[in-house]
Image: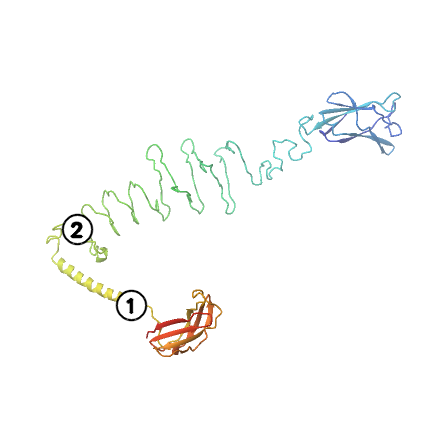
Amino acid sequence: MAAFLTKYGVARHIYIPIVKRAVVDFAVSADWTPSAGDVKISKDGGAAANVTNLPTAITMGNGAIWDFSLTATELQAAQVVVTVVDAATKAVEDQSFIIETYGNASAQHAVDLADSVRAGLTALPNATPGAANGVLIAGTNAPVTITGSGDALTISSSGGNGVGLKIAGNGSGDGIKSTGGATGAAFELVGGATSGDGLKVTTTSGHGFNIAATGTSMHGITATGGNGGTSDGIKGVAGTGGVDIRGNLTGNVTGNLSGSVGSVTGAVGSVTGAVGSVTGNVGGNVTGSVGSVATGGIAAASFAAGAIDAAAIATDAIGSAELATTAVNEIRDAILSDSTAFAGASIAAIKAKTDNLPEGIKKNTALTNFEFFMADSTDHVTGKTGLTVAGAVSIDGGAFGALTNTPATEVANGIYKIDLAAADLNGTVVTLKFTSAGADATLITIKTCL
């Protein structure tokens, strides 16, 4: 019995030879004309039924093969058996063939051989391995997105000193870019079981850490030391040319500060031990003695106005014992010197301001682009446009005469301009008059300056 493999529920042609009765020759169409009932089909051992389509002969030289055209319905079974049994006075020998199906849960073989990618195995990605959404391979893969309801990806190295995950970015891309959940951390790291670090960073040329926090009251780094021994929140060791910690500190400092402190905002409770030197201002109080102040250490510029008044000096705070023999003379000379310098500086400052007072319109000096406003004679408010404005001038109470450069030029929105010649301004008091039909006359009086 011949056996065939075909797709479940898909119509199919089966081609086989039929042997003539009592001989070994292949039957041709002239030898046998199939009739209903000659060809039967049984699905999964069920009752036999006539096939939908009787076979037809296809001539092959001096012989023939026969085409069995089976329908999709006839192939909806795991196993299909077809028999050929001619009626009485047989023209052909009895024979049969079996068909096993694939590619369906009800088929003999669930694997879909027609699926060249995953053979119908729906648990496998339906894409070329290594391609987008395909099975990962050892080699080049398309970018991969993994989503899971629990831990999306768990990786463990079993080799000696093997790395669990080794990642390298490309160009300006990051080696790892991670985003935490709504309240989760982007990274949660746990060091080795004995003495492994939670995080070890080694760079080629960049910063060990480049951190920028976002949000209100969010810190760049929040660090908590260990629970035994001497465990620091942060321990820094300077690199070449650097310092252990650089930046501003808010909070307590326990230990030594070596080097300069740019500024301290807020009170310093106390300093235990010697302060080598203070360069700059001491904003608050000094309680206790100051061993010495170097020559020139306190200069006049060190005291703001009113810095030392009666209230600031206790009774008898400065007596003969506190002053050296020549101290009074030096104080007197300094006061006189500062007073003279102060007076000179004040006079210079006043002169500088008066010298820079703005000038007026100069007498007998041309003035270009002198602007004025023409109001509409209907409402006496709205700027009147499109006028031909004539200008006249009265100098020191004299009769009005035409301006040198009349008429004026329109600017916009009722504003006009005219260039005033030196002759137009050759007086101490100059009155300008501008007139035009449809507009109120505009009068402007100017007191010139030398």
What is the number of the mark on residue 343?
none
Q: Position of residue 111 (x, y in %)?
A: 66, 29
Q: SS for tag 2?
A: helix
Q: Nearer the viewer, residue 332 or 363?
A: 363
1 up-or-down from 253: above or below: above
Q: Which residue is mark 2?
A: 311
2 or 1: tag closer to the N-terminus: 2
Q: Relative to residue 217, is residue 13 depicted above or below?
A: above
- Identify the secondary structure beneath mark 1: helix
Where residue 349 sits, quadrant-wise, is bottom left
Q: What amino acid is at disc 2?
A: Ala
How is colour applied across the structure in the image?
Answer: rainbow
Residue at 17% from the left image edge and 63% from the top image edge: 336
Quadrant location of the C terminus in the rendered image: bottom left
Give the residue displayed 73% in from the left and 24% down from the top.
79
As drawn, is 168 to the left or to the right of 293?
A: right
Q: In this rendering, would 23 be left or right of 267?
A: right
- Distance from the alpha carbon under mark 2 to that under mark 1: 39 Å
Residue at the spot x=39%, y=71% of the render? 443
Asked where in the image residue 126 lies, by quadrant, the reply is: top right
Mark 1 belongs to which amino acid? Thr
Give 245 or 238, whichever is nearer the viewer. 245
What residue is shown with label 1? 354
| 227 left or right of 107 in image | left
- The reply to whether the C-beta atoms of the residues labelled 2 and 1 are less than 8 Å apart is no
Tell me where residue 428 appears, x and y as whole percent: 33, 76
The answer to whether one can see residue 42 in this image is: yes
